[in-house]
Amino acid sequence: MTAFRVTDMTCGGCAGRIKRSIVAMDDKACIEFELKKRTVLISGTASDAEFAEAIQDAGYTPELIEPTSALAGNAGNAGPNTARCKCRAAHHGVSCCGGDDSPS
């Protein structure tokens, strides 16, 4: 798993834009959001740099952080991009953060 702090992500709409950008680049990615901590946890086939670029393409500023410090308990001890995603809603039109994830 890869974790980013995105301090300019402030709401479910922001999370939805980030999610759409990441999924457009890696359609197998699973994305989890912790809005209060302003973090994004991603599992997928792309590299950390590609995930960061997708977040930037959505208009936000990603800062790569350690997964265990980002979302304690979700990342476990898995290495980058290898942990099993816990987001069951990843590809069903529902945002993990509870925001509207319908296409704009």
Image (spheres, helix red, strand yellow):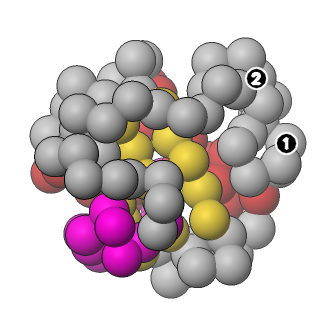
Q: Nearer the viewer, residue 29 or 8?
A: 29
- Tell how many labels: 2
Q: Is residue 94 left or right of residue 53?
A: right
Q: Residue at x 51, y 41 (%)?
A: 31
SS state under label 1: loop
Q: Residue at x 60, y 33 (%)?
A: 87
Expressed as whole percent of the image width and height from the top left, the position of residue 78 reads 23, 45
Q: Nearer the viewer, residue 59 or 6?
A: 6
Callout 1 environment at 10 Å: few (<14), some (14 to 19), or many (20+)? some
Q: Nearer the viewer, residue 78 or 15?
A: 78
Q: Which residues are magenta?
A: 58-71
SS state under label 2: loop
Tell me the amino acid under the disc marked 2: Gly
Q: Residue at x 23, y 33 (%)?
A: 82
Expressed as whole percent of the image width and height from the top left, the position of residue 80 reads 18, 46
Question: Dividing the picture into quarters, in which one does residue 29 lie?
Answer: top left
Residue 5 visible, this orientation: yes
Q: Earlier in the sequence, mark 2 or mark 1?
A: 2
Picture quarter with the N terminus: top left
> To which residue does mark 2 refer?
93
Q: Residue at x 73, y 17 (%)?
A: 92
Expressed as whole percent of the image width and height from the top left, the position of residue 10 reads 69, 75
Tell me the amino acid under the disc marked 1: Asp
The stretch drawn in magenta includes residue 53: no
> To which residue does mark 1 refer?
100
Picture quarter with the C terminus: top right
